[in-house]
Amino acid sequence: MIEVKNIKKTFGDKTVIEDVSAIMKAGQCNLIIGSSGSGKTVLMKCMVGLFEPNAGEVLYQGENFTAMKGSEKTEIRKEIGMLFQGSALFDSQTVEENVMFPLNMFTKDPIRKKLERVNEVLARVNLVGANKKYPSELSGGMKKRVALARAIVLNPKYLFCDEPNSGLDPQTSLVIDRLIKEITEEYNITTVINTHDMNSVMEIGNYILYMYHGNKEWEGNKKEIIFSKNERLNEFIFASDFLQDAKDMRMLEEKGKISNDRNMEELLDKDAPILIPPPADE
């Protein structure tokens, strides 16, 4: 779990984040959304220690990351995987070498053990046999999967994804979303995703933090966002008539599910009286 407490970040006279708090739990996809300039990227950088907040705390499993010394922060960072917006693969290295890079940096395992781990994570992202390919030989979706394999190769407790669907077509974006969600649940990782992709919000948003002008404007999950009456959130998420219609349809669908669930609960309630219809008149 990662807890953000009253984070404030300024650059000179400009306040970019003002008193933001959030709790991001393990085993779920925690999304930070907002328009450009809303502060979501700065918040993520404060969380991983690339920026030092002017006030507030970032806690990893209850430990105050912001107050740690350099060596202590390094230990936490060893438990962090990072999926960068542009994949950030080394062009001169093969897929195998790219994925092995964190193992070479942080472990002293023999090459055989490192290679076993590389093959494990490549299989997990459905890239068996791609070891000797170079990034220039890969599609955009394959590059993202290699980057994801590299991000999880050290078995991280925390996974940060910066715009994981940037530059991908909608179908490939769904594949990446579902893969991130599966890996998050399978390994019980605390995953934090910075995204503009509204498909991601509606598909994998277990927890959603909406930033507006450096403030926390709204928080909830993908179901709650459908029924939200926050005008700024609705203008951001459901900007077009098409998306507004989609929201209305989803609201009707969710209301139908709630109604059906309540009916089922009443049927299964042992203490509820059993109503027997009277016999029909002959």
Image (cartoon, helix red, strand yellow):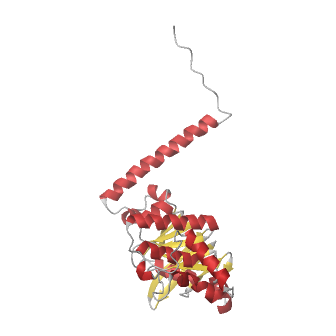
Residue shown at 60% from the left, 64% from the top: 185
119 or 41: which is nearer to us?
A: 119
Q: Is residue 104 left or right of residue 175?
A: right
The reply to whether residue 238 is visible in this rendering is yes
Where on the picture, by quarter, is residue 272?
top right
Q: Is residue 113 left or right of residue 126?
A: right
Give above or below for 29 relative to 9. above
Position of residue 225 measured from the top left corner of the image (x, y, whole percent): 46, 59
Where on the picture, by quarter, is residue 5?
bottom right
Position of residue 101 measured from the top left corner of the image (x, y, whole percent): 57, 86
Position of residue 169 measured from the top left corner of the image (x, y, whole percent): 37, 68
54 or 266: which is nearer to us?
A: 266
The reply to whether residue 153 is visible in this rendering is no
Residue shown at 55% from the left, 38% from the top: 263
Residue shown at 63% from the left, 68% from the top: 187
Quarter holding the N terminus is: bottom right
33 or 96: which is nearer to us?
A: 96
Position of residue 234 measured from the top left corner of the image (x, y, whole percent): 39, 62
169 or 48: which is nearer to us?
A: 169
Where on the picture, by quarter, is residue 50?
bottom right
